Image (spheres, rainbow, N blue to C red):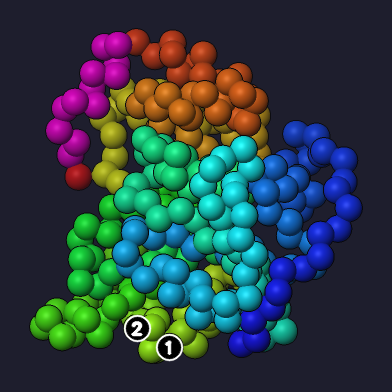
C-alpha cells in the first residue's frame, strides 16, 4: 500500500440532469457539492465511526499522514481526506465526523448522513471499538440501512483481549452481511486484511445478505413501499430510497428540509399526507 497525496482537481463540469442520475458524472457532481473531488481516483471510501474508536488512527495508517484538511462546504466542521494505492487502484479516503448515530440530530450527524446518502461512496469503513461493541453497533446498523457496501473494522481488539473479551468476527460478518476485520490500528495489525476487504467490496464482492430491521406493521409497510417507489422513480441514482422514505414517514425534520432544498425533490408533501392514525402504528411493538 502506498499513501498518496490528494489528486489535483480537474475543471468542474456542467451539472448533469436527473435523467443521468445513475451515471458517474452525476455522482461526481454530488460529491463536488459535498466538497470532494474524485477525478483521477478509482474509488471513494468513507470512514465512519463513533468518537474514541481509533478512527483517526485508522485514517492516518491508511493515508500515511498525507492528508488534506479543511471544512465541509458551508459548515464549521473540519474535514480530512487523503488517499492510498492498493493493487494498482487509487482510493480517495474521506474521514467523516465521529458520530453515535445518523439521525441528524446534530451537525456532525447531518454531515455524515448526507455524505453516505448523497455522496454514494464505493465503500464505507465503519470503525468500532471491540471493547464497547454493543454501543458501537447502533451506528453500524444505521449505516447498513443506507448502504451494504461496507466493511466493519473491529478496532482495539488488543484492548478487548486484555479485558478478557472475545468477538466471533466470522459470525458477526454473517449476521451483518458485510466483511468484519479485527484490527489494532495503532500497531498496524489488521490493516492488510482491511485493505483487502475494502478492495473486495469496491470491486462488488465480499457481501452477504444485507442486514435489515424487522418488518414494520402492515399499514406502515404499505405507506413506506409506496413512498419508496416514488423516490426510486424520481431519483434512480439514490442508493437507498427505502431509508429516505422511512425517515420522512418518521418525521425527520432535517431529511424533510433536504427534500425541500431540492436534494431529493418535492416529496416531503407526500410524507406529510400520511394520516396521524397510520403513524401511530409505529408506537406498537414490532414483531420480528
**Residue 189 in the figure: left or right of residue 198:** left
Q: CA distance from mark 2 to mark 1?
A: 6 Å
Say which element carries label 1.
loop
Choose between 287 and 91: the one closer to the eye: 91
The answer to whether residue 146 is left or right of residue 28 is left
Q: Is residue 275 left or right of residue 260?
A: left
The image quarter containing residue 222 is top left
Rendering coords of residue 164 (x, y %): 11, 83
Q: Which residue is mark 1?
A: 188
Q: Nearer the viewer, residue 20 or 121?
A: 121
Instruction: Using a 10 Å C-alpha cutoff, classify the residue at mark 2 as few (fewer than 14 neighbours), some (14 to 19) or many (20 or more).
Output: many
Question: Local crowd at mark 1 within 10 Å, few (<14), some, or many (≥20)?
Answer: few
Residue drawn at the location 29% of the way across and 40% of the way down? 215
Q: Element at badge 2?
A: loop
The residue where tag 2 is placed is 184
Residue at 65 percent across and 34 percent down: it is 235
Residue span colored magenta: 276-287
95 relative to 245, above or below: below
Q: Position of residue 237 (x, y in %)?
A: 66, 43
Residue at 87% x, 40% y is 14
Q: Which residue sits at x=46%, y=84%? A: 191
Q: Residue furthest left?
A: 164
Residue 145 disc label: none
Amino acid at each position: 500500500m502506498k499513501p498518496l497525496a490528494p489528486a489535483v482537481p480537474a475543471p468542474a463540469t456542467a451539472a448533469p440532469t436527473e435523467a443521468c442520475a445513475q451515471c458517474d458524472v452525476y455522482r461526481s457532481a454530488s460529491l463536488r457539492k459535498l466538497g470532494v473531488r474524485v477525478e483521477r481516483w478509482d474509488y471513494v471510501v468513507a470512514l465512519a465511526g463513533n468518537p474514541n474508536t481509533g478512527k483517526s488512527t485508522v485514517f492516518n495508517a491508511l493515508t500515511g499522514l498525507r492528508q488534506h484538511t479543511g471544512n465541509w462546504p458551508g459548515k464549521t466542521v473540519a474535514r480530512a481526506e487523503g488517499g492510498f494505492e492498493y493493487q494498482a487502484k487509487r482510493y480517495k479516503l474521506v474521514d467523516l465526523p465521529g458520530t453515535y448515530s445518523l439521525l441528524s440530530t446534530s451537525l456532525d450527524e447531518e454531515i455524515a448522513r448526507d455524505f453516505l446518502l448523497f455522496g454514494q461512496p464505493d465503500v464505507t469503513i465503519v470503525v468500532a471499538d471491540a471493547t464497547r461493541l454493543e454501543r458501537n453497533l447502533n451506528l453500524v446498523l444505521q449505516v447498513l440501512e443506507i448502504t451494504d457496501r461496507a466493511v466493519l473494522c473491529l478496532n482495539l481488539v488488543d484492548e478487548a483481549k486484555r479485558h478478557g473479551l472475545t468477538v466471533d468476527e466470522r459470525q458477526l460478518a454473517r449476521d451483518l452481511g458485510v466483511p468484519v476485520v479485527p484490527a489494532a490500528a495503532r500497531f498496524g495489525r489488521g490493516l492488510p486484511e482491511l485493505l483487502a476487504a475494502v478492495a473486495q467490496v469496491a470491486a462488488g464482492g465480499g457481501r452477504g445478505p444485507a442486514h435489515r430491521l424487522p418488518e414494520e406493521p402492515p399499514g406502515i409497510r404499505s405507506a413506506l413501499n409506496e413512498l419508496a417507489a416514488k423516490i426510486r422513480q424520481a431519483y434512480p441514482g439514490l442508493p437507498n430510497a427505502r431509508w429516505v422514505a422511512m425517515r420522512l414517514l418518521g418525521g425527520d425534520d432535517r431529511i424533510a428540509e433536504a427534500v425541500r432544498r431540492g436534494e431529493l425533490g418535492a416529496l416531503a408533501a407526500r410524507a406529510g399526507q400520511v394520516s396521524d392514525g397510520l403513524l401511530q402504528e409505529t408506537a406498537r411493538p414490532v414483531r420480528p
